[in-house]
Amino acid sequence: MSRKRWFQVRHDVSGASRRWLTLLAFALPLAVWSAVSYVPWIWHPVVKIEQPGEVSWMRAGQLVPKEDFAREVAAAKEAGLTLPSGKRANPIFLPAPHEVGRALYTAFTTKPVLRGDRWLHESLWTSIRTIFWGFVISSAVGVPLGILCGAFASVSRSTEPFVDFVRYMPAPAFGALMVAVFGIHLEPKVAIIVIGTFFQQVLVVANTVRKVDGGLLEAAQTLGAKRRQLVWRVLVPASLPELYNDLRILLGWAWTYLIVAEVVGVSSGITFFINQQAKYRNFDNVYAAILIIGLIGLVTDQVLAFLGARLFAWKNPRPSRFRTFFQRLFAGRDVLLFPDEPAKKEISA
Amino acid sequence: MSASVYANLPDYRAQAPAVAERFRKIKERPVVLDVQHLTREFMSERGPVTALRDVSFQVHRREFVCVIGPSGCGKSTLIRIIAGLDEQSSGRMLVDGKEVSGPSPERGMVFQGYTLFPWLTVKRNVMFGLEMAGMSRDAADREARQWIDLVGLGAFCDTYPAQLSGGMKQRTAIARALAANPRILLMDEPFGALDAQTRAQMQAHLLEIWRSVNVTVLFITHDLDEAIFLADRILVLKANPGEVQEIIEVPVPRPRSLEQLTSPEFLATRRRLDELIHPKRETPTIERLPIVRLTEVGDEVE
């Protein structure tokens, strides 16, 4: 297909282009980052000293603004001193991709500097536990309450105004209170995530349940369904795929609350790791940790999306991507991968 | 239809002996649905509106009654009230002599929009009513299969609704409604969303099903031919407010077939319905649009 199709309004691109564009989405920022890091005349506002020469205040490895460096060189030349030498470099807060790449590996293998410090994997595990419990506790109450709000106007009217009110209070504002109530360890952090997630969750779930086609409820009623069955056998299954997607999105929000939650009480988890590494000016480790959070988010989301497509096959009946991938992989080869594959016929009346 | 087609037609009230005998027998049967003085009013922005006024009629066991009327005559409101999905302002309904209100499986409903449960397969959809009635999974499964075979979807038991065509969806919906064993089957323009060909096929299917199943049908449509083709009697409503204008006994003999669409009895009934629904006006011309000519000379299409 021609390139024109890429810019057709609300028109999807072909499968191959789709993959390339996805790759591009990641390759482009990486390319920009690499360009800024490796092409010496792009940005590079400081000079990394290699030989201090006879300039008294310079040390090897020091980063000096390039204007200062030029001035010192001129001054040294005039005074007949040994000239300092150095290379153009980027400020310390922008490490090059390969340094971050290396840090991604070494962050897991480097021993903590201080006795109280944690390994990266320990920090990550603490964070994941915090998120997990926060999200599970919030969902355990929020989803059923949201479903009730969506099903019964009386519950909705008596609950949602207050929920809506609390929703606007920023979760971090409850930090000090939570520490007073729950102490300084994991509990107040979980509480912050619950506060951040729960109130949104009730409203989002209620809205999703309200969107269920009223015709389905009427049909069920003429088939003899009573109140309890209307909720359990119609509203819940009908909204389940959307609820699942809602929870996926809310889980993403929970991660954003994590960072504020973790500085409450005793700083812990990935936030503590990041702060500690920034203190040591190991910015490659900081980037590595941020990237890992992004990766965890991306991977969980993709896994959940994949499971969702499988769980709610009725919503979008089509051959699974997983299957087609393997079929294409073995196309033309004499391998019976899926012997039970039904003949795909066009169904018509 | 032009006047020439209607020339020399018999009176639509004239019935052949066999047809007259059939109606005599129908009227001897017990009344399944008895609608008495049904009125429905609601408030709109422009004040109170009467959607239905004093609608009364009876449907006998195993009778096929169609309700027809111009748009806005309240025929959908009528069937929704009978199904218990809407509430009347006054009047009452009796099923088998007992007053009813609220939805119940004894008054099954087939909707224009199918309303199949998309997360259930064809079979599980049909099982829904049976399970609501407290039947065990196994028994419901067996019974559902019979109903699915009846509507000719045996090969699609495990298919999800999204994969079915419109006609197949509506057949599933009919099977689902029938499986709940209703005393009367209410159908609200069930074939309105189907293309002409599928529609004709579905009408034939429905008559076949009705013949072999112990069920009474109340069928809403705005298609005059559909009403004549299907019904024993046609309840004609008029709009603003919705009132019963006439109840017509269709003189077309059964079994019905598509050839009858041009039979004298059919056309006579059709003429009567046309008169009732599209009454003659003083100037039956179509209003001209004030369009300026935009084509070139010699480019005329008519």
Image (cartoon, coloured by chain):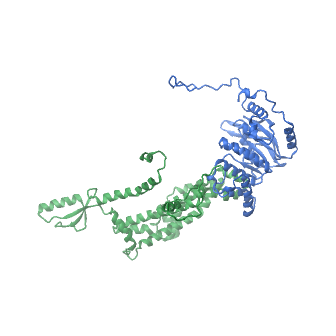
**B150 or B106: nearer the viewer:** B150
**B289 or A135: nearer the viewer:** B289
Q: What is the total number of numbered labels drawn onto the structure image?
A: 0
Q: Quadrant of residue A26?
A: bottom left
Q: In the drawing, does residue A125 fall left or right of residue B240? A: left
In x, y percent, where is residue B203? 72, 44
**B260 or B33: nearer the viewer:** B260
Question: Is residue B236 shown to the viewer in this render?
Answer: yes
In x, y percent, where is residue B275? 75, 30
In x, y percent, where is residue A300? 49, 63
Q: Quadrant of residue A107?
A: bottom left
Q: Look at chain B in the picture and name its colour.
A: blue
Residue at x-position 34% and y-position 58%: A33
In x, y percent, where is residue B38? 78, 41
Above or below — where is B22 with respect to B13?
Answer: below
Q: Residue furthest bottom?
A: A115
**A346 or A235: nearer the viewer:** A346
Residue at x-position 68% and y-position 52%: A217
Question: Is residue A268 shown to the viewer in this render?
Answer: no
Q: In the drawing, does residue B146 fall left or right of residue A348? A: right
Q: Quadrant of residue B225?
A: top right
Residue at x-position 39% and y-position 77%: A115
Q: Look at chain A in the picture and name its colour.
A: green
Residue at x-position 70% and y-position 42%: B200
Above or below — where is A280 with respect to B61?
Answer: below
